[in-house]
Image (cartoon, coloured by chain):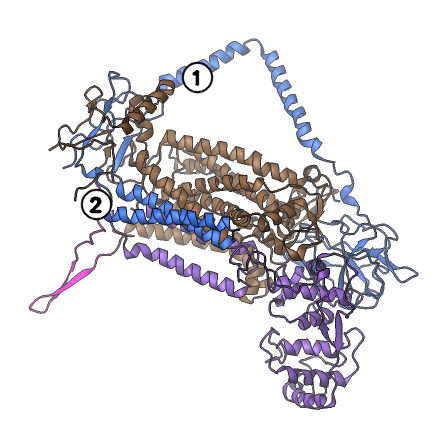
Amino acid sequence: MQKKIRVRHLLPLLVLGGVTAVGLITTAASGSTVPSSPSSNSTTRSPSQSLPTSGRRSKAPPIVYVVPNSKSDIKAGEVLFEANCSSCHGPAAAGTGVAPPLLGLGPATVSFWVSTGRMPLATANAEAIRKPPRFPPYQQKQIVAFVSSLAPTSPAYPPGIPLVNTKSASLPTGNSLFVLNCAGCHTITGSGDALANGAFAPSLHKATATQVAEAIRTGPGNMPFFGPGNLSNQQVADIVAYVKGPIQHPNNRGGLALGGIGPVAEGFIALLIGVGACMLIAFWIGDRA
Amino acid sequence: MTDVTHETPGSAPGGGGAAGGVGDTGGSGDGSDASDGADKSSPVFPVASFEDPHLEPYARNPRRAETVIGIFLILGVIGFAGYGAVYYVGGQTQVEGIFLGAGLFCFGFGLSAWGKYLLPRGPFVEERHSHVSTAAEVDAMTAAISGRGKMMFRRRGFLGGILGAGATIMGVVLAFPLLRSLGPVPKDTFDHTNWRTGSLLVDFNGRPIRSDDLEVGGALTVFPHGFVGNAMDQTFLIRPENIDIVTAPGRETWAPLGNLAFSKVCTHAGCPVGLYEEQTQQLLCPCHQSLFDVGQGRPATPVFGPAPRPLPQLPLMIDTDGYLRAQSDYDQPVGPGFWERS
Amino acid sequence: MSSTNGPVQAEAAPRLDTDPGTKAVRAGVKWIDDRLGVAKDGGRSLLDKIFPDHWSFLLGEIALYSFVVLVLTGIFLSLYFNPSSAEVVYHGAYAPLRGTKMSIAYASTLDLSFAIRSGLVIRQMHHWAADVFVGSIAVHMIRIFFTGAFRKPRELNWIVGVTLLTLAIVNGFLGYSLPDDLISGTGIRIAYSIILSIPLVGSYLATLSFGGQFPGDGSIIPRMFILHVLVIPLIILGLIAAHLGLLVRQKHTQFPGEGRTEENVVGSPMYPTFIAKTTGFLFMITGVLWALGGLVQINPIWQFGPYEPTKISYAVQPDWYMGWLDGALRIMPSWEFSGFGHTIPFEIFLPAVLFPGLTFTLFYAWPFIEAKLTGDHAEHHLLDRPRDRPRRTAVGAGFLAFYAMLFAASSTDVLANFFNISLNIVLWSFRVIVFVVPVIVGLLTYRICLDMTGVKGVGKRKRAMIVTRSAEGEYSTVPSAPRPGDEHEELPPIPVPTYVESDEEQTQEEEGVRVVPR
């Protein structure tokens, strides 16, 4: 029976503390974590937000589609395209064996893939995931301008890059639409998850408002298409507002958020820290041998 | 210099520690006689010397231990006061958690440390006393039960039978309010939904759906008009192509212009199959990852995961104004399986 | 030195002090004894009750004190939670849901989390305590199993304990489903389908308990509430009383050691040592749970939104203690029997009804199975070291590994996302892992146990070897002296002294703190 607390008795405590710290930091880093003050809710505020069907929407349209088509942009875009994209997509974006044609996909599609850094892809078989964009915004605009100039945009795709005005967006409507249409793949917290056969639905935490609208309207990858017959421009704006608000800046007034991947993370903490700490206390109170 | 009284215990069971027992050994193994009740004269209480090492505190340095314990108790009180103050000014979850959590922890640590380090370290011992009765006692109890039982039932078997049958019937009848009053019986509730011939497809806002509202590659949740939000009526409308799709013989007219409608209720455990992979043309259920194939005219066939049956398909038609309507209800019960499902 | 060191007759007992404190105590003791006779035998059966000191015997207390926390925080929550499925339009503190229709149950939980002071910390504490409650029961049960404490005469207590585990899991499920949020509501949907899958009576049980086809007539929430706050806690309380009562009557088990036999119990006395330690333990556990409740977010229902049967989220699992069932549901192949006009959906019925039924039947039956297999029907009060019973330990380790694999299988999608592996591969791997890993673990454990029993000094710190060199250049090694704390310096046990005597003119105390003059 020892009469002192020895270093080796502290060792399990330190190990537990270290593992806990690492675990908490990694889960914190993977999700949004700042414990906000009790009443904070950083979203765009508007007087009509609290009324479900207000009718007092501001006159400005919720989405404005912008087409970059200046001649200088197109010319510069052609150079960029030949250097970075034509090796897979063909010199006039007509497609090759390894990559599809880009004709008629419209500015919004090209803008989404390029601005999220998914394109250019290192090899044809690489997974297209969000990366830091290869090109600065002005060059992205040029590439978009060039590809859009090659063929008229098919009516299935939006006519331009969507600029979203969330001033008159309704968060409760956005919430309802998000849960119905988006949460099934992207999860209710927007953390993303794995789909079947190696596909996955990405996290929404880094998307800009434009990228969200682009994705909704152009259905990249395995994502379904949500055209105007499915979701109106106002509804898209509502969803964008909800993503930019409670999804990307969730109210975590309960403390450390655990990544938004569901109760499995909570169980991990409950066993490791909850039961673990109590077991350590028991280890201290009782005898060892 | 351990105390005199005690040989290693283990001599006799009995004595010591029993509530109301005579405790003539007053504790363990000082060698006195075994059986309970042998000496009911007066209880005996063990005595130990003040210098007995068993009574020493566990801590090598009790003064220092006292100081540390005192510090922790004070930290505890600070924690309590802090929590009270935070609550008074309106509360904040994390601060409340830290103050009272740390406060309780420190206070408890002080108390436990007091018990561990400052109190006699022992170890101390008490005797078990066996619960097992003698064979004679067991025989006696058996005789009591069976003997009196025989007295009750001798030549009264018939009455016993009525008693037993009555008790059973009572149990059965008492179950009626406990079970049957809870709710309705199924009847044919599971066999039908609210879709009928001519039901208009509407979305979550009640808006009717035209046959060209959905883009190719689009997906939408629809309901029969008047039943928006109904759990079993919910239907997933997808559009893999824009020409008629035939998913099985007999279903040639069911998917006009590529508008394909399946029940959204997973045939595994009933979750809404809300995940449409537009390129691989598969429906994935988020709960247990059942995968249903809808590409190349396949009728939502389960290809992966635990779902046993394809999602029932809703036959659609396009009315004269271009709106989508149902031709009829589903041709089978929707949702997970159950006994009466044939 | 001291006068008598032996037990004394009552008449010859040293006189009590006459200070007011002791006088008051005596008056109180006499008052109660006049009515209940508690002072028989000097009250030693209560005050001197011995608790063995090993740390693993405190695991059950973690469960007990988590339950105390659950009851206290639960009472607080029940004063604010409104268990009604009636719909209301929310106009409360959480802006993104203002104007949304939701059940009153969900709205009252939002109010608890946003509008009531200390509401969120207590609500989260309640949820953490529930997770820790089931976890500590599991850890405690594992200890009981591996040390053989369930053997005669304690099979009854084992049965009570397994029932407590079942009720804890059920009550936890009912509890986290009460707020009627999207994730727990999905769990209720699955529960409905599980009930439905039972042959012959499933559809009746489902419509009776819910009030119709899913989601029913709304009565499920108030029914879950009354089960969760009244019926099941009452049963749990009664079973805990039985559990502790059996423990008091049969006395605790102990590991073999100095002075410890099958006929005694060695450890610390109830008063004051054990009471001090255990009350402190209660406060510490409460402190840990309170800190968790304030610092780590759990079940942020406002982010999930209210439950609607048409809505779903990905990456949802039940709470951890239901994970083994969720994992079983995911990896089960789609075997459904359909014929003769009836369907038995084995793809649900097997993993969600038959399998847990089998599991708990096995748990209940284990003491009797082991007694039959080993032929050991003797009373046991001394515990086994797990390594000394390699077969039981291996079987236990294998089963633990099996359930652990099922737990892991309940997060197939999250694992696939995290490790960037195809979901299909993850699922198929689990179908194999769930059977292969337990066998490997069991075999390995068996081997390790056998190896450990064969080696002297295993598990203890190794002694350093001192290498000496003689003048001729010959090297020899000698074990060093044992480290001071390594040897087991325990005294032989004595009964708890009622009277403490010294030859000094000091106040005699009954087993008090010894003040060491400085």
Image mark 2: chain: C
Q: Which corner quadrant holds the C terminus of chain C?
A: top left
Magenta residues span C462-490
The colour chain B appears in is blue
Q: Nearer the viewer, residue C468 or A146?
A: A146
Is residue C401 at all visible to an observer of this figure?
no
Question: Quadrant of residue B322 in the image?
Answer: bottom right
- C25 horizontally vs B47: left or right: right
Residue B21 lies within the magenta run? no
Task: Check disc 1 and report the residue beneath it.
Answer: B142
Residue found at the very far left of the displayed protein = C471
The colour chain C appears in is brown
Residue in the image at 32% along x and 23% along y: C27
Q: What amino acid type should be assigned to the residue bearing mark 2?
A: Glu
Is residue C161 at all visible to an observer of this figure?
yes
Q: Nearer the viewer, residue A192 or C345?
A: A192
Task: Check disc 2 and report the residue beneath it.
Answer: C489
Among the chains, which one is purple?
A
Q: What amino acid type should be assigned to the residue bearing mark 1?
A: Thr
Q: Position of residue C152 (x, y in %)?
A: 39, 33
Mark sitting on residue C453: none
Q: Nearer the viewer, residue B38 or A165?
A: A165
**Dot 2: few (<14), some (14–19), or many (≥20) neighbours within 10 Å?**
few
